[in-house]
Image (cartoon, grey):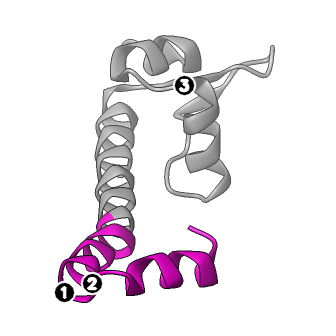
Amino acid sequence: MSEKYSIGEVAKKLNMTPRAICFYEEKNLVTPDSIGKNGYRYYQEKQIQKLELVNWIFQLVRLKVYLMINVPLIHYSYYSGNKLAKMKKKFYF
């Protein structure tokens, strides 16, 4: 039988917070292998690998969103000078 890890152990192993793991569970992206009588969620290596992949994808999406917001503004400011300040004021950046 494979070793089971608690949510805290998994979080530490993947350098994540237990809350992040709960978030992914709430979105039905990962599910624990089992839930103990004490209500603790336990994961096996298969779920840990999936969780690592899901977290990696979420980080890429966050980076993409950041770049979509900031890189066009940088290019816009390079070509337009003072228009960036007006745009930032309009959109509360």
Mark 3 burial class by Cα count in 10 Å: few <14, some 14-19, many 20+: some
Give the CA distance from mark 1 to mark 2.
Answer: 5 Å
- Relative height, residue 83 to residue 38 (above, below): below
Q: Is residue 63 visible?
A: yes
- Relative height, residue 67 to residue 80 (above, below): above
Residue 79 relative to residue 58: left or right: left
**Circle 1/circle 2 CB separation < 8 Å:** yes
Earlier sequence position, callout 1 versus callout 3:
3
Give the CA distance from mark 3 to mark 2.
Answer: 37 Å
Residue 17 shows which numbered tag? Answer: 3
The quarter in which the C terminus is drawn is bottom right
Q: Is residue 1 visible?
A: no
In the displayed orientation, state which residue is furthest to the front.
Answer: 82
Magenta stretch, main secondary structure, is helix
Q: Callout 2, which amino acid?
A: Tyr
90 in magenta? yes
**Residue 89, position as x, y percentages in the image:** 60, 77
Give the CA distance from mark 1 to mark 3.
Answer: 41 Å
**Residue 91, position as x, y percentages in the image:** 60, 80
Question: Is label 3 or label 2 in front?
Answer: 2
Residue 79 shows which numbered tag? Answer: 1
Question: Is label 1 or label 3 in front?
Answer: 1
Earlier sequence position, callout 3 versus callout 2:
3
Residue 76 shows which numbered tag? Answer: 2
Residue drawn at point x = 39 percent, y = 37 percent = 47
Question: Is label 1 or label 2 in front?
Answer: 1
**Residue 36, position as x, y percentages in the image:** 71, 19
Find numbered disc 1 in the image and state the secondary structure of the residue it sits on.
Answer: helix
